[in-house]
Amino acid sequence: MDTAVVGQQCWQEDVFRVLKQHGVKHVVYVPDIPHSTTIREAEADKEISAVVLTTEEEGIGYLAGAWLGGDRGVLLMQSSGVGNCINALALQCCTRFPLLMVVAMRGDWAELNPWQTPMGRATEKALTLMNVMTWRADDPKDVEPLLHGAATMAFNGGHACALLLGQRLIGEKQ
Amino acid sequence: MSELMQYGSLDRREVVARLLSGRKKLLVVGGIGSASFDVMAAGDHDNNYYLWGAMGGAAMIGLGLATARPDYSVLVLTGDGDMLMGFGALATIAIRKPANLTVAVLDNGHFGQTGWQESHTGRGLALEQVARTCGFSWSDKITNLNGIDDLRERLHTRSGAKFATIKIRASTSPRVPPPRDGVYVKTRFRSSLGHYPI
């Protein structure tokens, strides 16, 4: 169930719209609440293959395969899942397929669960270490342009690009 | 290195060459290590995608490819070590039910590239039973060349996700390295399907 409140729905719908505008055909994910809208819309869209994963690194392989076949996709996950992806990101480094990721942050602001904090604090650094470009959205109005920019650089450049959805944007988990 | 133990009896090079002989509209993903060498040894091909890293990833690459290209048959050929590292992929593939995907594990029961330590399959785990439990539409253990001929025919059926454990000898074959340049292999593969460089 969404925890979105009035004023936040807008950015959640922006995510799916931008993905559609960029011709994304595959939405592969390990769920998190901030991705709920995107997941629901992807599952309902007959032109999109929505694939639930058992672990995030499955998504790296899947999207590499989809691109081999000519299709664009996106990987949705929580920041803790970035830790699971590190070695799999070698696949992107060595083959340079477009890899677009949207990461819902934990452990970066008003985190209620301290066990989320170690990986949350390391998420952006870990992505950077593995040659993934990152942008961070803490304001609802930034989601659309930043995701558009990340998708453009992924699909036109063969880069790995991640948009981080900050906890200031997502809202404090109670 | 000579044969370590009585495991499977099939020769991996013979198996892969036989499986790929006369291939048509078949896209092949070769898993990390010996499996990629086997695919290369059977003949380099524009529709081969070789892995040198990202262990555990071969089956999911196959799922993405099979989903994007339902007009082709997709075969993932990988080792037991790679399949074990990507164990969850069996669940993910099974629920997607890709009609054109076959995952074939060349199972020697060992981590052959890292010193021949015994793997889970060498200690009794039957991957074909795991795949069947997950929901693959067809799953079997192959111990002879008749089984390979049968599998080759099944690659082009559209009856759902298929899984085979191929029991091969735990012995070393000569290294036949495919290209290490992942960008080249990717671009060649895509070009052969009509997708030009970005």
Image (tube, rainbow, N blue to C red):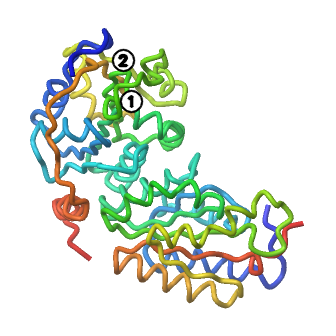
Query: Which residue, given by chain and number where applicable, does mark 1 sit on?
Result: B80
Extreme residue toward the right, this view: A174
Label 2 sits on a secondary structure element that is strand
Residue A142: image quadrant is: bottom right
Mark 1 chain: B
Q: Residue at x 17, y 28 (%)?
A: B173
Q: Left or right of A119: which side holds A173?
A: right
Tally the marks. Answer: 2
- Looking at the image, which is closer to me, A26 or A117? A117
Badge 1 crowding class, 10 Å Cα cut-off, few under 14, some 14 to 19, many 20 or more, is many
Asked if badges 2 and 1 are on one and the same chain, I answer: yes
Q: Which mark is residue B141?
A: 2
Q: Left or right of B79: which side holds A32?
A: right
Mark 2 chain: B
Tell which circle, 2 or 1, labels the residue nearer the N-terminal end. 1
Percent from the top left, x then y, of residue A6?
83, 82
Location of residue A89 with respect to B4 vertically, above or below? below
- Looking at the image, which is closer to me, A6 or A140? A140
Residue A71: image quadrant is: bottom left
Q: Quadrant of the C terminus of chain A?
A: bottom right
Q: Residue at x 38, y 40 (%)?
A: B99
Percent from the top left, x then y, of residue B55?
40, 45
